[in-house]
Image (cartoon, rainbow, N blue to C red):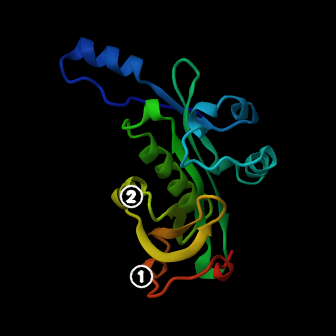
Amino acid sequence: MARAIATRPSSTGDRDFELATFQTMTTLRRFVADDLFRFNNVNLDPLTETYNISFYLQYLAQWPDYFVAAEAPNNACMGYIMGKAEGTGKLWHGHVTAVTVAPEFRRLGLADKLMGILETVSEKIYNAYFVDLFVRVSNSVAIGMYEKFGYSVYRRVLQYYSGANSEDAFDMRKALPRDVNKESIVPLPHPVRPEDLEW
């Protein structure tokens, strides 16, 4: 299902508003396999993880509702979100595996729209208790953005990111309506290691 949204309309008059709306229409739709050949402009961002093809295809097959692309009027890939449902009992939750927007399309509210879709899918389709994500502790811009979206730091995961740019991560969470008492977001007082993660 595709949805069109208007972003940053002009306030200088009706004619300008119509033109701005036309120029900035964004289609939000399910990510499809062909998008893997069109998202290089998004994945060139050094903070965006790029996975192998089978990883993306697994998400497309198992969690298609969680994989959404934002497309410009010229069919350019503006950004995407991918996620999944995992856990058991009160740890049943939606997980943001990746959310990213191409540099030329930032500050239009796309990340907010994409996160909203994932949260709605988690709540309405999977009846999850919360949504979580991992973010590098040095990525203050992303942390601030997630906090603006209602996420808070649940715990620090030591050396979550490995390789040349090894770094700790924050596990950030946002409670959904099913978690009436917001138990899922009570911060842990101590850091954990990747092998201590539940899933």
Mark 1 to mark 2 CA distance (whole Å): 28 Å
Q: What residue type is labelled 1?
A: Asn
The tag on residue 194 is: none
Q: Quadrant of residue 104?
A: top left
**Which residue position is annotated with label 2?**
140
Image quadrant in which the N terminus is located = top right
Up the image or down, 185 lies above or below 100; here it is below
- Residue at coordinates 58% horizontally, 80% vertically from top-left? 90
Task: Mark 2: give few (<14), some (14-19) or many (20+) Cα within 10 Å.
Answer: few
Asked whether disc 1 touches disc 2, contact meaning CB atoms under 8 Å apart, the reply is no
The residue sitting at the front extreme is 164
Q: What element carries label 1?
A: loop
Q: Quadrant of residue 62?
A: bottom right
In the shown orientation, is residue 174 left or right of residue 91? left
Up the image or down, 51 lies above or below 147; here it is above
Specify which label sits upstream in the sequence, 1 or 2. 2
The tag on residue 181 is: 1
Q: Which of 71 and 190 is in front in this view?
A: 190
Up the image or down, 62 lies above or below 107; here it is below
Image quadrant in which the C terminus is located = bottom right
Q: What element carries label 2?
A: helix
Residue 82 point in image, percent of width and height: 62, 50
Note whether residue 180 is visible: no
- Residue at coordinates 46% horizontally, 82% vertically from top-left? 183
The residue sitting at the left extreme is 12
The residue sitting at the right extreme is 54
